Amino acid sequence: MAKKLACYYPALQLVSSFDELSLSIKNSEPEVILVDSELLQSLSLSVIKALRECSSRTDMAIVLLTHVVMKEFTAAEQLNVNDIIVKPIRSAELARMIQWKECQNPMPSNDVSHNSGMVQTGSLKGINLLVADDQDANRVLAKLILERADANVTLVEDGKLAVSAAAFQQYDCILMDLQMPNMGGIEATQAIRQSTGKSCNTPIIALTAKVLAEDKAQCLNVGMNDFLTKPLDAPNLLMTILQHISGEKTTLVEPNFTPIPREFSSTTIVDVENGIALWQGEESLYWKKLIEFNKNSLGLVKGIQLKLEAVDYAAAAAIAHNINGQAGNLAIPKLQRAAKLIETDLDNYEKGSLVTENTLDQRLQDLSLAQTQLTEFICKNKEKLNSPSIGDDNSLELDNAQFFQQLKVFARQLAQADLDALEGISILNSFWSGSIDIHQELSQLESELTHFNFEAAHKLLMKIVVKKKIDIGMEI
């Protein structure tokens, strides 16, 4: 970690004892201190106070690093530190937190041509992974990253499907979103751990936009093995998976492959360079998912407004969390920040804190403005979206030949009761999104898949193929 930080922060000083730390604070007056809890004489307010008294600075930030979740301290404020990070340390998490004002060297850019965040192929060859996330863009991004590393990936949309999949198939690792419909990640993890299914003891890693120490503690307490925050840091994700599969630290994915995101201006609408880097240089796919999210975002913002009017703060917070996570993975910082503030306010309200109506009204106005600016940004970039570098509409959608080929694969998967068939419904919904004539059959097919009724789903698919008069050159 020290070598990694030294590459970007020349003013970095290293000490190995509490006395050295105290002396260094007195001599150099640092702006930020990263201190391992094991270095402290005791974990108490008095020790932190002693460190602060060594400096004349009133703005010195103290970040505590610990290898265990401290149940007795649910918030950093209780220890008078600025934040608590549970080890193993994520480089992206550190980079977003530490801002060296005296450092003259800017953070490295995320120019995709030099982007060090590209995944090494072969890193996860032969590894079977289950990814549970209710948002399509998040699933697609996770699959892109993991399949680039040659992993075998199964995608599911909620906790119930994750529990069912884990019961019938042996996975090497499970990536679990926390907030999902039908069953969340916490409940799904509890169900998996209490079961006797094939993956009941498989490592489970939480994927979430939440970053509070109490959220990490809850995940670990129900049987999860680790906690990763969105937006996804591709090399760190792979390294974490490998560590839990092997049971020891690994260097198969070098830590210095991690791109350190630059700090966003609060007025940044879309950080296209960082977004394309997050999507592994897949520019067309990134723009496609950005456009899809924009189409849905107005409805999500309206949903928050309606839930707030109905005083259903839990539901409003869940929608804000949805926007927060997707906006993070698509590098839409202003919208992400606005959604995160709403989510935080509503979470605090649920815990007993006072949140005024005026505050929520202002938060909602900020969110609506950010959504409007996102739409305007996309409209202003229409010329770029239609350029050869991005591709025309056919490059963003499946053509008929591609679709029919995937339809064949989907049919075989259903016939063989293959869990990978769970991904097929999203392909059908995408290709036939405007087909009112088969809307009912598609809904029934999705319902049957949700309950793992593969035979019934296969019959419905055949009914749809006949209805659409499709000749795919095979019996399905």
Image: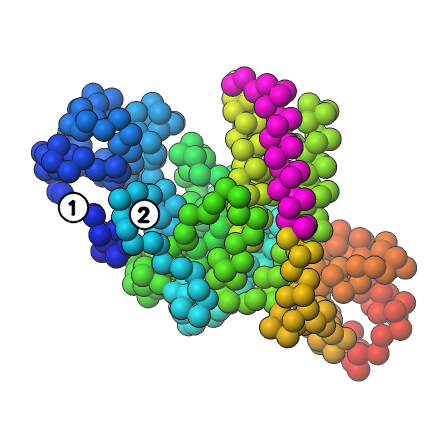
Residues under numbered marks 2 and 1 in contact, where contact means CB atoms less than 8 Å apart: no
Residue type, mark 2 in image = Pro
Q: For this rendering, which residue is in front, 211 or 34? A: 34
Q: For this rendering, which residue is in front, 198 or 22? A: 22
Residue 328 shown in magenta: no
Please state the extent of the stretch shown in magenta in the rendering.
Answer: 353-376
Give me the disc on residue 249: none
Q: Using residue 456 as the reference point, say whether residue 245 is left or right of it.
A: left
- Which residue in the protein does label 2 denote? 88
Residue drawn 76% across the image and 65% down it = 431
Residue drawn 43% across the image and 55% down it = 233
Q: Which of the 4 quarters of the picture holds residue 119?
A: bottom left
For the question of whether residue 226 can be seen, the reply is: no
Residue type, mark 1 in image = Leu
Q: Using residue 449 as the reference point, say whether residue 214 is left or right of it.
A: left
Residue drawn 26% across the image and 32% down it = 60
Residue drawn 71% across the image and 43% down it = 298
Q: Residues within 10 Å of mark 2 (few under 14, many from 20)?
A: some
Tag nearer the camera, 2 or 1: 1
Disc 2/disc 1 C-alpha distance (Å):
19 Å
Magenta span: predominant SS is helix
For the question of whether residue 83 can be seen, the reply is: yes
Percent from the top left, x then y, of residue 12? 20, 47
Give me the disc on residue 14: 1
